């Protein structure tokens, strides 16, 4: 029997070659090396970090890891690991669902002429999983925390190996679930079913919040068994964790095999999108808008709401962060960290390539007599609406369930962090949209506004900016000078305005506009 | 070489047009005139410069050099005014994917400042191009042919003095082709200049009375379109292409 030719490596290599621009290739290469280096540094640093001492009445580390009878900080960190694992598992389940069944190296339309196997699609999606800042940051934190708190006579390697198996199992199951949902959603009944499922999840989350069962649920999380296996491995007992290790290996393999089967089913399944789906259904006709700007804005808003991947992303952004913030019941000092996280997530839906909303129609729009600045302003406004909407929702949810009462500095910091992040993110998005345009259909369930490598760099860039901003405002809550967050806010708003002005100047150049328009219209 | 389609006023008047994309010269010193009521077919191989020429006339891309006047307006000096007098159907897509045909028409009417009553003209055109039933569906669900028909409709919507159609017949069914030919006829009757770029020689002959053959961004021949019909015409065309 003829051996089937490999597909993943040629496709990955083609995607790499398609980056074309040397700086982008170098940037990606450096980012990948830095990512790996940071991971190693986290492990080595964690394993060698001073243990410190805690008062005996505090957390008893000896319950978890005997440390010569002297209690230290390891126990405090170790007890958080099951919750962090749970958060990672949740991310692995939600991310492929939000991505519409796994990540794409190439849009479906570009591979349609080639006999690409389903297993190739699943493997490519697995390969792309780490190109997600949330996935990577959680892995980084979990490995560093494991290296610090579960170090034993054999160093941090044994518990980290158990952890890696757990991470692999979660990623593998997430893929299967994501593809399953793609198949289910191909019919109207399936779509209704997923809405019911989502509603139920929201109700359950609400019930957990209202009845204050969050802590009890976290305590009962099955991830504590993984921690136990890590502890046994850390102590040099390599026999006791074997059953769990075997189960995790089995889950990884089964998850992969099931993903391939489910993906094949999902992609083969005849859907009703052609005759009964959203594309075939007429939309309500509205009267003309009162101004040109409003007419453009109306079309742009519709372009967002009528795009399946954007709609799903907005829904995830509206539900997940607010549910997490409500369940976690954060103190006001941490609430300033939330707007930055949500803002960068919202921007990645389409903001980093906002001008692609017009698709091939960008050429037609450019032939209509109008002030080109109106088009850019309209796109910026839609991005600002989406980002600020997501920020407001998470802020309200977190504030309603905050664990303490805020003082003036807390309030000013939270508002300042929100305003600054929205302004910074919108300014960055519009800059990227004009300087790094991509053709993006944003039509299929798994479409993204830019290719995977670019998306990884964009998410890194936005997350770095917004996390720094969040940390500054969070630090501001430690003091009692409300003028400090106000000054930082004004400074960041001024910087955003300057960046926006530069982008507008760039957009006014006809040659820049031509390049953007022809790229988003035809690639 | 220039293609003169009459000695009267020329709504399309291009002199010494050059378009360069980096080291590539897409159009090299093109001269072209289309008179009011005249129609010219731009024909030639892929990459001959047909679409680029139409994109310059449509105000999508600025020329590297040369003079371009549309309906008396300097398209280089006053591109915004030029867009008011041009109706352009792009060669690919040309439609906002998640907007409906009616929303496209609404946007065009607003941006072009069309007077009250444009709705009736819009409905008539939708009927003629058999798109009334799909007027409120998003265009990303359209077939290629439906998209082409809508692009032609949008180009002709404001009854421009210059109508530019790039591959208007590509993938369009016979009824759609008839509707497009009818629109070209109507435009010419009201005195518009029509420029059609196509690879379909028979339809170029049916739509236009003049044909201009482009090669490597230059005009290599200009003749009455009828001369390119039939076996002899096709043979001559093939010679001009190589």
Image: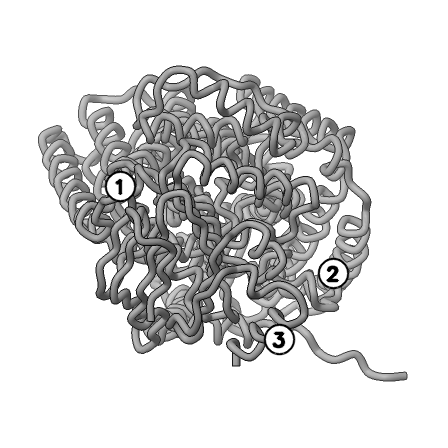
Which residue appears at 66% of the width and 67% of the height?
A237
In space, the residues marked 1 and 2 are separated at their CA atoms by: 49 Å
Of pointers 1 and 2, the one earlier in the residue sequence: 2
> Same chain for marks 1 and 3?
no
In space, the residues marked 1 and 3 are separated at their CA atoms by: 46 Å
Q: Between residue A59 and residue A379, name the one nearer to us.
A: A379
Chain under disc 3? B
The answer to whether residue B26 shows anywhere in this view is yes
Tell me the quarter of the picture where residue B109 sits: top left
Residue density around tag 3, few if under 14, some if 14–19, many if 20 or more, within 10 Å: few
Q: Between residue A137 and residue A363, name the one nearer to us.
A: A363
Q: Position of residue A346 (x, y in %)?
A: 42, 40
Residue position for label 2: A256
Chain under disc 2? A
> Same chain for marks 1 and 2?
yes
User: Disc 3 on helix, strand or loop?
Assistant: helix
Chain under disc 1? A
Tell me how many marks there are: 3
Q: Between residue A82 and residue A54, name the one nearer to us.
A: A82
- Quarter of the image with the N terminus of chain B is bottom left
The answer to whether residue A75 shows anywhere in this view is no
Q: Are marks 2 and 3 in contact (CB under 8 Å)?
A: no
The image shows residue A495, relative to residue A126, as above or below, that is above
Residue position for label 3: B235
Q: Position of residue B156 (x, y in %)?
A: 46, 36
Q: Position of residue A102 (x, y in %)?
A: 63, 53
Nearer mark to the viewer, of 2 and 3: 3
Q: Position of residue A380 (x, y in %)?
A: 31, 37
Task: Judge left or right: residue B174 versus residue B85.
Answer: right
Residue position for label 1: A372
């Amino acid at each position: 029997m003829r051996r089937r030719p490999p597909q993943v490596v040629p496709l990955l290599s083609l995607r790499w070659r398609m980056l074309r621009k040397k700086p982008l290739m170098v940037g990606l290469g450096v980012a990948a090396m830095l990512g790996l280096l940071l991971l190693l540094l986290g492990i080595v640093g964690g394993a060698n970090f001073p243990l410190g001492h805690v008062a005996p009445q505090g957390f008893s580390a000896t319950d978890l890891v005997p440390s010569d009878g002297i209690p230290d900080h390891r126990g405090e960190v170790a007890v958080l690991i099951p919750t962090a694992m749970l958060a990672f598992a949740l991310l692995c389940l939600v991310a492929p669902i939000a991505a519409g069944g796994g990540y794409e190296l190439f849009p479906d339309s570009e591979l349609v002429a080639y006999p690409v196997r389903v297993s190739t699609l699943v493997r490519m999606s697995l390969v792309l999983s780490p190109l997600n800042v949330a996935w990577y940051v959680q892995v980084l934190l979990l490995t560093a925390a494991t290296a610090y708190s579960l170090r034993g006579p054999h160093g941090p390697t044994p518990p980290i190996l158990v952890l890696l198996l757990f991470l692999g199992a979660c990623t593998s199951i997430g893929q299967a679930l994501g593809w399953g949902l793609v198949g289910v959603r191909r019919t109207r009944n399936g779509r209704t079913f997923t809405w019911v499922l989502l509603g139920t999840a929201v109700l359950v989350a609400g019930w957990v919040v209202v009845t204050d069962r969050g802590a009890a649920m976290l305590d009962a999380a099955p991830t504590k068994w993984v921690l136990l296996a890590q502890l046994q491995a850390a102590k040099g007992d390599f026999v006791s964790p074997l059953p769990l290790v075997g189960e995790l290996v089995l889950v990884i393999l089964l998850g992969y095999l099931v993903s391939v089967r489910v993906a094949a089913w999902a992609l083969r399944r005849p859907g009703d999108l052609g005759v009964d789906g959203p594309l075939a259904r007429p939309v309500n006709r509205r009267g003309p808008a009162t101004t040109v700007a409003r007419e453009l804005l109306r079309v742009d808003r519709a372009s967002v709401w009528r795009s399946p991947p954007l709609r799903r992303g907005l829904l995830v952004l509206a539900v997940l962060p607010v549910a997490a913030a409500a369940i976690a019941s954060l103190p006001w000092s941490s609430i300033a960290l939330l707007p930055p996280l949500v803002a960068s997530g919202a921007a990645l839906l389409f903001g980093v390539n906002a001008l692609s909303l017009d698709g091939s129609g960008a050429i037609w729009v450019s032939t209509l007599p109008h002030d080109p600045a109106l088009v850019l302003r309209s796109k910026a406004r839609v991005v600002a609406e989406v980002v600020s909407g997501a920020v407001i929702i998470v802020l309200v949810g977190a504030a309603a369930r905050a664990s303490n009462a805020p003082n003036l500095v807390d309030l000013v910091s939270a508002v300042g962090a929100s305003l600054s992040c929205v302004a910074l993110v919108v300014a960055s998005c519009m800059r990227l949209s004009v300087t790094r345009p991509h053709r993006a259909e944003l039509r299929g369930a798994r479409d993204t506004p830019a290719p995977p490598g670019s998306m990884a760099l964009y998410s890194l860039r936005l997350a770095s900016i917004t996390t720094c901003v969040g940390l500054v405002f969070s630090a501001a809550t430690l003091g009692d000078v409300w003028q400090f967050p106000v000054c930082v806010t004004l400074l960041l708003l001024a910087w955003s305005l300057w960046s926006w002005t530069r982008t507008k100047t760039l957009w006014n150049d006809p040659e820049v506009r031509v390049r953007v328009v022809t790229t988003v219209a035809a690639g | 070489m220039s293609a003169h389609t009459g000695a009267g006023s020329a709504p399309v008047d291009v002199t010494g047009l050059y378009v360069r994309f980096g080291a590539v010269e897409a159009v090299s010193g093109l001269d072209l005139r289309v008179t009011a009521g005249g129609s010219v077919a731009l024909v030639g191989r892929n990459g001959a410069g047909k679409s680029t020429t139409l994109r310059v006339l449509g105000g999508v891309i600025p020329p590297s050099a040369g003079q371009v006047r549309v309906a008396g307006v300097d398209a280089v000096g006053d591109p915004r005014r030029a867009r008011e007098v041009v109706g352009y159907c792009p060669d690919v897509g040309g439609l906002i994917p998640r907007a409906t045909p009616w929303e496209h028409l609404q946007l065009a009417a607003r941006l072009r400042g069309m007077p009250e009553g444009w709705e009736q003209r819009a409905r008539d055109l939708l009927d003629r191009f058999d798109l009334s039933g799909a007027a409120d569906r998003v265009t990303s669900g359209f077939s290629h042919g439906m998209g082409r028909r809508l692009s032609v409709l949008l180009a002709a919507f404001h009854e421009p003095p210059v109508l530019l159609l790039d591959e208007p017949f590509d993938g369009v069914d016979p009824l759609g082709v008839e509707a497009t030919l009818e629109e070209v006829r109507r435009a010419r009757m009201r005195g518009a200049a029509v420029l059609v770029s196509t690879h379909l020689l028979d339809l170029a002959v049916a739509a236009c009375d003049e044909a201009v053959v482009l090669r490597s961004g230059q005009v290599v021949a200009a003749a009455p379109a009828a001369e390119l019909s039939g076996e002899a015409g096709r043979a001559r065309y093939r010679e001009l292409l190589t």
